[in-house]
Amino acid sequence: MKNTTIVIIEDDEVLRNAYATLINDVDGFYVANSYASVEDASKNIINDNPGVVLLDIELPGTSGIDAIPLIKKKLSKCYIIILTVYESEDQIFDALSNGASGYLTKNSPIAKIIDSIREVCEGGGPMSTNVARMVIKSFQKNQHSPLSKRETQILEMVSEGKSRSQIANDLFIDSETVKTHIKNVYVKLDVNSKADAIKAARKDKLI
């Protein structure tokens, strides 16, 4: 069986070494190198010539998302799997738009990571369950929503029963800002209450 060459870019040394050891134990897989940053990797990644790169998002220097097109420019046939703790909608779509072939969260079991490497090599697009659910939900939403991303996010949190202060804490904004966003939602949806806003948004697939 032909070896699949893999490069790991992950700033956590313990995690980086653990991935390398576990992946190297799999028949047909070979970890050519592992790096703590995109800058370190860029010096030698062409010589490594990986078929698959496992890439973290939060890295010192260039972020994983910004690194995707840089790696693809050097290695056009390489598949990139994001492996991160982050699963925000914006980051998922930025990564996929930039050319990532898969998106896994770090709580994925090693068996899932191994299967995902095989899957991308066969043309698949592996994702963690939560990430896949988020992508599907986004496609199901009305793409012509009058609401901004932030307004949609806040209305979704309201629909989950969160109070204004909880929303403010979760989003690291003040309570008055949340109040302003909610008022704007009411105006855009032509409603006067939270219940009516949620009902109207669900009817038009805005959330």
Image: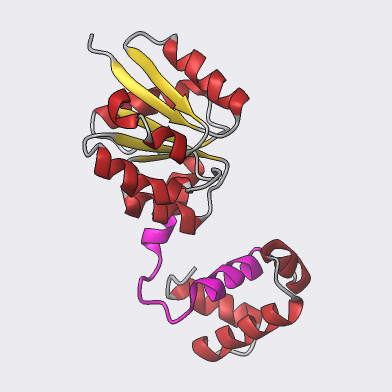
> Residue at 49% across / 39% down in the picture?
56
Q: Inspect the magenta stretch and tell me whether residue 157 lies in it.
A: yes
Horizontal and vertical percent position of residue 75: 25, 36
State the image quarter where residue 185 is shown.
Answer: bottom right
Q: Inspect the magenta stretch and tell me whether residue 183 lies in it.
A: no
Q: Nearer the viewer, residue 26 or 31?
A: 31
Q: Is residue 198 visible?
A: yes
Horizontal and vertical percent position of residue 190: 52, 91
Residue interval drawn in magenta: 136-162
Q: Nearer the viewer, residue 136 or 46?
A: 46
Q: Is residue 126 visible?
A: no
Q: How is the image coloured?
A: secondary structure
> Residue at 28% across / 42% down in the picture?
72
Q: Nearer the viewer, residue 128 or 1?
A: 1
Q: Residue furthest right?
A: 165
Is residue 9 shown above or below 111? below
Q: Residue furthest front?
A: 43
Quadrant of the snapshot with the N terminus: top left
Counting every numbered tag in the picture gives 0
> Residue at 68% across / 80% down in the picture?
177
Is residue 70 shown above or below 117? below
Horizontal and vertical percent position of residue 36: 52, 33
Is residue 28 shown above or below 56? above
Horizontal and vertical percent position of residue 22: 49, 14
